[in-house]
Image (cartoon, rainbow, N blue to C red):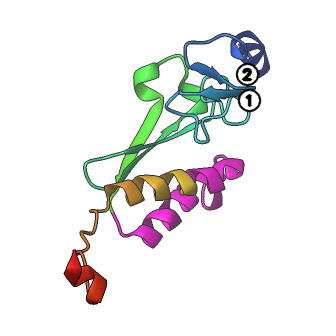
Amino acid sequence: MSADLVWAIIKNNNSFLVKRQNVEFSSEPSNLKNVNTFKYSGLANYKNVTIAPAARGVRLTIKKAGKQQSPAKSANSVVISKSGRKTFKTVANLIARGTKYRPDLRAAAVARASAILASQRPVKVHAKREAKGVRANKA
């Protein structure tokens, strides 16, 4: 089926659709911005990109457009466990620059990778400052 026909069928009803106050979101794993639009839909587009957290770094999965009949062979997955800027450059090169796979998704993919790396960073514990002054000593 064509991508336009699939989108016409699933745009109003699918299991990933989340409707909130006048806004429609999508919780599908291959939707980079989590909005219910044709551009970002991983169900409707043959070429889609999934960025998910890995043990260290991010896992980038690219669907091959010509292998839809055999789902086991259709996904090409790679784990990127580099520093922040190198990860962003690798994601951008795999999606847009080098392969020209889906150049329109480059910014969204880099933003998703950035958010995942930020969530994997350990939280800094700040020591509480000692209270100073006359009023602090009275209490």
Asked if the magenta segment contains residue 108, the reply would be yes
Residue with the mark numbered 2: 3
Q: Residues within 10 Å of mark 2 (few under 14, many from 20)?
A: few
Task: State the residue at coordinates (62%, 51%).
Answer: 108
Give coordinates of residue 49: x percent, y percent. 55, 40
Q: Is residue 83 above or below residue 118?
A: below
Give coordinates of residue 120: x percent, y percent. 32, 56
Give coordinates of residue 89: x percent, y percent. 52, 67
- The quadrant the C terminus occupies is bottom left
In this rendered view, identify the residue nearer to me: 101 or 9: 9
Of the two numbered discs 1 and 2 on the same chain, state the one appearing first in sequence. Answer: 2
Residue with the mark numbered 1: 38
Characterize the magenta stretch by its predominant secondary structure. helix
Residue type at the position of mark 2? Ala
How many angstroms separate mark 1 from mark 2 (CA)?
A: 9 Å
Task: State the residue at coordinates (53%, 16%).
Answer: 69
SS for callout 2: helix
In this rendered view, identify the residue nearer to me: 17 or 88: 17
**Relative horizontal placement of residue 7, taking residue 91 as reference (left or right):** right
Mark 1 vs mark 2: in front? 1
Asked if the magenta segment contains residue 99, the reply would be yes
Task: State the residue at coordinates (66%, 34%).
Answer: 35
Q: Is residue 131 above or below residue 3?
A: below
Give the magenta range.
Answer: 82-109
**Relative horizontal placement of residue 36, taking residue 52 as reference (left or right):** right
Whether residue 67 is visible: yes
Q: Residues within 10 Å of mark 1 (few under 14, many from 20)?
A: some
SS for callout 1: loop
Residue type at the position of mark 1? Phe
Check if mark 1's residue and mark 2's residue have beta carbons within 8 Å: yes
